[in-house]
Image (spheres, rainbow, N blue to C red):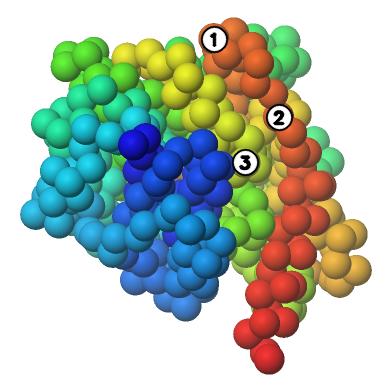
């Protein structure tokens, strides 16, 4: 039997992985205990998504295990380990601001949880390909010290800089920088996944995501900005822009395109390899530009205000350079542009809101 195991399986990337792998593996095992609801309240509740994938895929099996507890993980790995071909580790505490409130919880989920999964893999499924969803926050606020220029609707890097053409590459330093508590816990996990590849020889891939987005995101104020912004545009909920004049830039990658990167890596894996993963120059926007797109798609004015206080460690400008991944896996490319992705997000949110009011 060929098995794919996915953590955070009811979240955005986890559920996309379940969908993608459901017709490629005999069984897809999901691990998710809906901790996102604890982090973000009702907006973060992923039960609707768990129910959706359970109803949609007959070869999906769900476990509400806590990745912080090896006692809950080990029975799963002992039962299925020999047949597990790929592990997508997408479970995480993903918010800067939330991490500062509960550093122990943040670190236990992001760092200790990742170590637990790596060790379970080493002991019970050493031939499996281990894919880790890291973050561009491992670079801390180093990108903020690049030569940035203020334009009408966005910050942009000086066009003479090497990063102008394609964005920030994997050689950008992760040292001597302010990461935020969240960024630091993800650095610990990121380095450990590399080490299990380089030291123990496991087939591990680290994907440092920009903004990951898509129609199945349970967007909340503290995480998932495009999904939450679109929800605000649809419902009239107030939205707050934090700092940088609303001109901060992010690249955005559709969850399908990211999981397709995972699939390409799985078919020809490496050990301890690191890739930046985002929308690159193909799909990026500033906060002001995102608001304009949401207003265009919904026909509504977004109810927003501006706060001069930026989030600690937040990026002013970040665009991922995917040159390295594309050179290793030339068959991969983006399928979804920014506006197309936002339309999908709009339709998904509108559909769920309609269902909730029935």
Q: What kind of element bears circle 3?
A: helix
Query: Which quarter shows the N terminus?
Result: top left
Name the residue carrying label 3. Answer: 256
Residue found 81% across the figure and 47% down from its top: 340
Q: What kind of element bears circle 1?
A: helix
Given contact means CB atoms under 8 Å apart, are the residues at marks 3 and 2 in contact? no
Q: Residue furthest front?
A: 1
Residue 74's spot in the image, x, y percent? Answer: 13, 47
Of the numbered discs 1 and 2, the one sitting upstream in the chain is 1
In this view, the residue in front, 13 or 155, is 13
Q: Residue furthest bottom?
A: 358
Of the numbered discs 3 and 2, the one sitting upstream in the chain is 3
Residue 73's spot in the image, x, y percent? Answer: 17, 50
Q: CA distance from mark 1 to mark 3?
A: 19 Å
Residue 126: quadrant of the picture: top left
Binning the other alpha carbons within 10 Å of mark 2 as few (below 14), some (14 to 19) or many (20 upward) gives: some
Classify residue 60 as left or right of residue 31.
right
Would you place residue 146 above or below residue 351 in this image? above
Binning the other alpha carbons within 10 Å of mark 1 as few (below 14), some (14 to 19) or many (20 upward) gives: few
Residue found 36% across the figure and 57% down from its top: 61
Residue 56's spot in the image, x, y percent? Answer: 56, 61
In this orientation, does residue 213 appear? Answer: yes
Residue found 11% across the figure and 31% down from its top: 123
Would you place residue 41 above or below residue 127 in this image? below
Residue found 50% across the figure and 41% down from its top: 21
Which numbered marker is on residue 334?
A: 2
Q: CA distance from mark 1 to mark 2?
A: 15 Å
The mark total stands at 3
Name the residue carrying label 1. Answer: 328
Would you place residue 136 above or below residue 48 in this image? above
Which numbered marker is on residue 126?
A: none
């Amino acid at each position: 039997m060929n098995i794919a195991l996915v953590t955070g399986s009811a979240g955005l990337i986890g559920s996309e992985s379940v969908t993608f792998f459901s017709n490629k593996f005999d069984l897809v095992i999901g691990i998710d205990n809906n901790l996102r609801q604890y982090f973000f309240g009702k907006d973060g509740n992923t039960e609707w998504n768990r129910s959706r994938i359970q109803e949609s895929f007959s070869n999906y099996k769900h476990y509400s295990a806590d990745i912080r507890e090896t006692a809950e993980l080990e029975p799963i790995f002992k039962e299925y380990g020999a047949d597990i071909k790929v592990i997508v580790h997408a479970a995480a505490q993903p918010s800067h601001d939330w991490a500062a409130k509960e550093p122990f919880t943040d670190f236990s989920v992001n760092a200790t949880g990742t170590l637990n999964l790596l060790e379970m893999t080493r002991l019970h499924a050493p031939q499996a390909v281990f894919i880790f969803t890291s973050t561009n926050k491992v670079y801390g606020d180093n990108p903020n010290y690049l030569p940035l220029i203020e334009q009408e609707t966005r910050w942009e890097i000086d066009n003479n800089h090497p990063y102008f053409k394609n964005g920030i590459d994997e050689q950008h330093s992760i040292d001597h920088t302010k990461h935020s508590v969240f960024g630091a816990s993800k650095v610990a996990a990121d380095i450990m996944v590399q080490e299990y590849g380089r030291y123990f020889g496991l087939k591990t891939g680290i994907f440092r995501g920009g903004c990951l987005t898509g129609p199945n995101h349970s967007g909340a104020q503290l995480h998932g900005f495009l999904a939450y912004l679109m929800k605000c545009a649809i419902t009239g909920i107030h939205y707050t822009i934090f700092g940088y004049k609303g001109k901060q830039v992010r690249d955005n990658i559709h969850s399908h395109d990211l999981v397709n990167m995972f699939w390409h890596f799985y078919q020809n894996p490496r050990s301890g390899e690191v890739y930046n993963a985002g929308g690159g120059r193909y799909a990026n926007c500033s906060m002001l530009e995102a608001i304009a797109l949401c207003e265009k798609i919904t026909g509504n004015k977004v109810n927003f205000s501006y706060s001069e206080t930026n989030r600690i460690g937040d990026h002013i400008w970040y665009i991922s350079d995917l040159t390295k991944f594309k050179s290793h896996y030339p068959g991969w490319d983006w399928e979804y542009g920014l506006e197309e992705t936002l339309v999908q997000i709009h339709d998904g949110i509108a559909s769920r809101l309609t269902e909730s009011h029935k």
